[in-house]
Amino acid sequence: MVKIKTVGKLFGSIANRIRVVAIVCLATCCSAAWSGQNVSLAWNSSPDADVVAYTVHYGVASGVYSSSLNVGNHTSATVPGLQDGTTYYFVVSASNAAGLEGGPSNEVSFDSPAPGAQSATLSWNSSPDTSVTGYILHYGRASGVYDSSINAGENTTATVQGLQEGATYYFVATARNAAGVESAPSNEVAYQVGIDSHSAAPRLQLTAGTQPGDPTRFNFLSSPNQTYELQATEDFQSRTTLWQTLPSATSQVLEFADRDATASGMRFYRLMVR
């Protein structure tokens, strides 16, 4: 989980009074996205008693946040629909009841794995040497050749992202002291990444109703032998399955109309392939 530091005092400067931007309002507009990757973020609550809500701002360039997600008074959020093989940058701001936003938190980044990429989690025993202050995991595609590394801090476990399907990786761990001097490596561990089957994302089309009470309509061209599941959420904390298809031997144009009203007036969608 990505951690974000405490959002500080908010409303001391008029320069920080930025209008909160809503992402999707079902009453006037709709959005649907291929599920892609997602990332979960969490942050400490603000000590300011005026704070009533938080907004996650994010984008594909450091310091440039072209998208935002208002998460109410929650101190965690899952951001869906991230594109494969892309680095995203995130900050969080807090706002008061008038919608005035404070300055952003520190920025964190997330590398969305490329298509076909997988991850592996490794763990090791802690060193009995009292001078050890941290561990480094080294790995590579050839035995004894470790061209990548992860600084695990004081942790005795680490997750390596972006491993390519079908490839074999070799791992060792080292301990280091406060001066950054590393120990000899541990025994080497080899791991062959499995191969998953993948389906191309369908071209999902969404049409919002023009009158109150009109349904939101979806259609797309399915792939043979695939099952599709349309999910909806109002808060990104829980999701409801609205519709699920059965596999077909041929490609077909599939359609669905969401006629359910929501108390909040907002609904977010994602389409999953099984």
Image: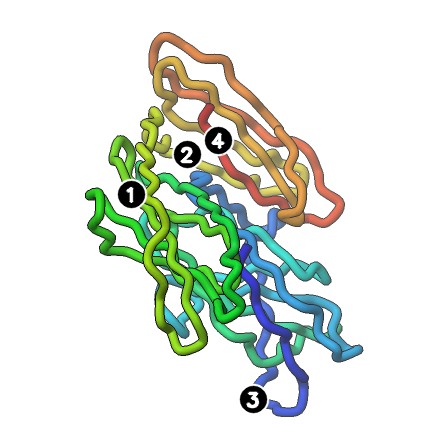
In the image, what residue type sits under mark 1? Tyr
Residue tagged by mark 2?
Answer: 204
Which one is closest to the eye, mark 4 or mark 1? 1
Say which element carries label 2. loop
Q: Residue at x 51, y 18 (%)?
A: 245
Q: Quadrant of the N terminus?
A: bottom right
Q: Earlier in the sequence, mark 1 or mark 3?
A: 3
Q: Is residue 24 above or below residue 4?
A: above
Q: Residues within 10 Å of mark 1 (few under 14, many from 20)?
A: some
Q: Is residue 78 above or below residue 44?
A: above
Please name the colour scheme applied to the rendered image.
rainbow
* Quadrant of the rendered image containing residue 181: bottom left
Instruction: Estimate the x, y position of residue 62 in percent, counting from the top left.
Output: 38, 71
In the image, what residue type sits under mark 2? Leu
**Could you tell me if the residues under marks 1 and 3 are in contact, i.e. CB atoms within 8 Å?**
no
In the image, what residue type sits under mark 4? Met
Instruction: Estimate the x, y position of residue 102 in percent, counting from the top left.
Output: 62, 80
Which residue is at the front of the view, 129 or 116? 129
Residue at far top of view: 249
Residue tagged by mark 4?
Answer: 272
In the image, what residue type sits under mark 3? Ala
* Quadrant of the rendered image containing residue 232: top right
Q: Earlier in the sequence, mark 1 or mark 2?
A: 1
Which one is closest to the eye, mark 2 or mark 4? 4
Q: Earlier in the sequence, mark 4 or mark 3?
A: 3
Q: Is residue 118 above or below residue 257?
A: below
Instruction: Estimate the x, y position of residue 139 in percent, counting from the top left.
Output: 30, 50
Q: Residue at x 34, y 24 (%)?
A: 197
**Could you tell me if the residues under marks 2 and 4 are in contact, i.e. CB atoms within 8 Å?**
no
Residue tagged by mark 3?
Answer: 15
Gap between marks 4 and 3, in whole Å? Answer: 41 Å
The dot on residue 170 is 1
